[in-house]
Image: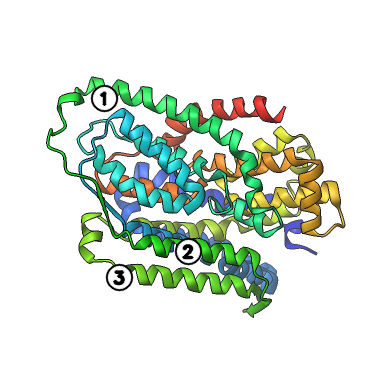
Amino acid sequence: MDLGEILPLWSATPFVGMLLSIALFPLFAPRFWHHHFGKVSLFWSLVVLVPFLLIYKGEALHEFLHILLADYLPFIIILVALYTVSGNILLRGTLAGTPLVNTIILLIGSVLASWMGTTGASMLLIRPFLRANSQRKNRTFMVVFFIFLVANVGGSLTPLGDPPLFLGFLRGVPFFWTFQLLPQMVLVVSVLLVMYFFIDRFFYNKEGMKSAYRKEKVPLRVDGLHNLLFLAGIIGAVLMSGVAQWGEMDIFGVHLPVQALVRDGVLIGMALLSMVTTKTEIREDNEFTWFPMQEVAILFVGIFMTMMPCLKILQAGAKGELSILIDTVKEPYHYFWVTGTLSSFLDNAPTYLTFLSSLLGKFYAGTGDREAVSLLITNNEIFLKAISAAAVFFGAITYIGNAPNFMVRSIAEETGTPMPSFFGYMIKYSIPVLVPIFILITFVFYL
């Protein structure tokens, strides 16, 4: 019997504990959290790992190894590669953080995110964005909108943009099909950019910034431009892993595609070449540090480990403890909101896969994945659009919804920009700003 069919709902308790730790410790014990967040992540990992190994033995070991080798390590490797290569590209010169300039940067980032990934676009632009606004007093809202647009919504148009869409590509969704999400993306991006511009203009005038910027201008130039070659290598490796079929390799009982292992090797190579061929002074001037990447790697290993029971229960569908939830998801707007809500707190990639599998089983049971996906696109495309848009858009609801959110927040804090707590981010920004927009999306596209 599948593990997800026998797991009780309370087996998700360690995952809830991990989320509450991320939410509450930085708020109530910031110094403890800064020095010991790794120990907290390890604690919750052991809380779920030890009893599962004792009770379910080999089956549990296989599931944990699978989530580490097949999900976590590739996830971290591509983040490290994009973080490294993007961090070795430096925009120099005078860039005044006016409302218009800031809005243009956010627009450019939203476009780039679909082609170099939300992580790559975020790491490329967040430091220039912060430097351009270093003289501004109110910067928190700027970083929050950066997370909304560049770290999430902008990654909607290609499988390179966000991991859920890449997994769909691997399952047979055509590479350019995701351009079907262009109307939804344009609507969300347009509303957010207009909203941002007027908020920024209000604070810009309130702070009296018109005379604050220096009159002398230093021409803009880009250093480390050769890293675009390594960025192209990363994109090429990801594409290759989606189309090549080179068999599988067994590692500790986990079957991993050979092309995925080659991809990860190429990504590591691109990151190393970037470090070796880029001058140290470029990284220093770019204020490049490894802490944001370390924080993501350490916290997300705890998140991946503790969310394993949650994902297995979801994947069990009608046979699991969440059968009531699965059975009530019928209409496109149901899929949009349930997929989105779960993607805000669970990893959006396996959540997307869970509901994609649910759709294929619902409409085309017994049909092979690629053929079923083709039929789904032909006959019930709106359902695929709903889960695809939701998995990407709702990643902006929480800091853990998408990995770049964490990195952007960490870099912003390192440069002196105060950022809201886990719940503060949701209560003050993401829920009041994004949820009304997603309701509008629901009425326009899914009803």
The answer to whether residue 70 is above or below residue 156 is below
Which label number is shown at residue 234?
Answer: 2
Give the residue type at disc 3: Thr
Q: Nearer the viewer, mark 1 or mark 2?
A: 2
Which label number is shown at residue 277?
Answer: 3
Give the residue type at disc 2: Ile
Q: Nearer the viewer, residue 50 or 204?
A: 204
Mark 1: give few (<14), some (14-19) or many (20+) Cα within 10 Å.
some
Residue at the outermost right position: 366
Mark 2 or mark 1, which is nearer the start of the sequence? 1
Mark 2: give few (<14), some (14-19) or many (20+) Cα within 10 Å.
many
Q: Nearer the viewer, residue 6 or 353?
A: 353
Q: Residue 299, position in %: x, y?
A: 45, 57
Name the residue tied to disc 1. Answer: 204
**Mark 3 and 2 residues: CB-CB less than 8 Å, in contact?**
no
Circle 3: element type: helix
Q: CA distance from mark 1 to mark 3?
A: 40 Å
The residue located at (77%, 63%) in the rendering is 2
Q: Nearer the viewer, mark 1 or mark 3?
A: 3
The answer to whether residue 117 is above or below residue 133 is below
